[in-house]
Image (cartoon, helix red, strand yellow):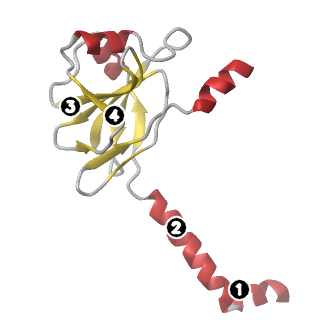
Amino acid sequence: MKRAEAVFQNPFWAVPLAAMLAFLFGCAGGYGRMEKGPEVTAAFVGHRVPSEHRFYYIGRGNMPYAVIGIRNEYRLQSKFWKSIDPESDAFRKMVETPYGYQENRARGALLLGPDGERVGIWYSTYDFANFRVTEDKDVYVYNPYTPTNDFEDKIR
């Protein structure tokens, strides 16, 4: 018991512990979550996506990793996501043939900010991607694809 008391009484441990906690809480702030939504899937499949969103895709134009819609009051910050007109034939083709559609069914999800507010919508064969939202309503959505995805599929 004396050894445990000595560890916590030594001020040397306070600084690294405080730094670690600050790092953990700092990383946690601003990240959103995805909530699966059959109504979002139906909107994409039925080509009835909401008009109050701007749409983007990441990956190849003929087989994107994901298609997202970001509400107009938010701004997507990225040089990798490309803008797409939801009324275009290209958009329709993307929804019909997302990356991995031969093996997996694409699904829709709501993109919810840290406060639970709806930021946008998601459509992909990937179930998850990290994203964060700033207080200034800037949205950073990270690529769901990593090269290890293909490697893991091939060794199964």
From this view, report whether residue 88 is shown above or below residue 132: above
Q: CA distance from mark 4 to mark 2?
A: 28 Å
Residue with the mark numbered 4: 81
For mark 3, give the secondary structure.
strand
Side of 22 relative to 78 (left or right): right
Q: Amino acid at mark 4?
A: Trp
Where disc 1 sits, the SS reads helix
Tell me which label, 3 or 4, sits earlier in the chain. Answer: 3
State the separation of the CA atoms marked 3 and 4.
12 Å
User: Which residue does the numbered mark 3 point to in the structure image?
Assistant: 54
Mark 3: amino acid: Arg
Closer to us: mark 1 or mark 3?
Answer: 3
Observer-side mark, 1 or 2, equals: 2
Question: Where residue 98 sits in the image (x, y, percent)?
Answer: 42, 16
Q: Amino acid at mark 1?
A: Phe
Q: Residue at x 49, y 28 (%)?
A: 127
Mark yes or no: residue 89 visible: yes
Secondary structure of residue under mark 4: loop
Q: Check disc 2 and report its element: helix, strand or loop.
A: helix
Spatial CA distance of label 3 from label 2 is 33 Å
Query: Percent position (x, y) of residue 114?
Result: 36, 51
Disc on res. 23 = 2
Looking at the image, which residue is at 27% across and 15% down?
Answer: 91
Q: Which residue is at the front of the view, 67 or 11?
A: 67
**Vertical relation: 18 (above or below) 146:** below
The Cα atoms of the two marked residues, 1 and 3, are separated by: 53 Å
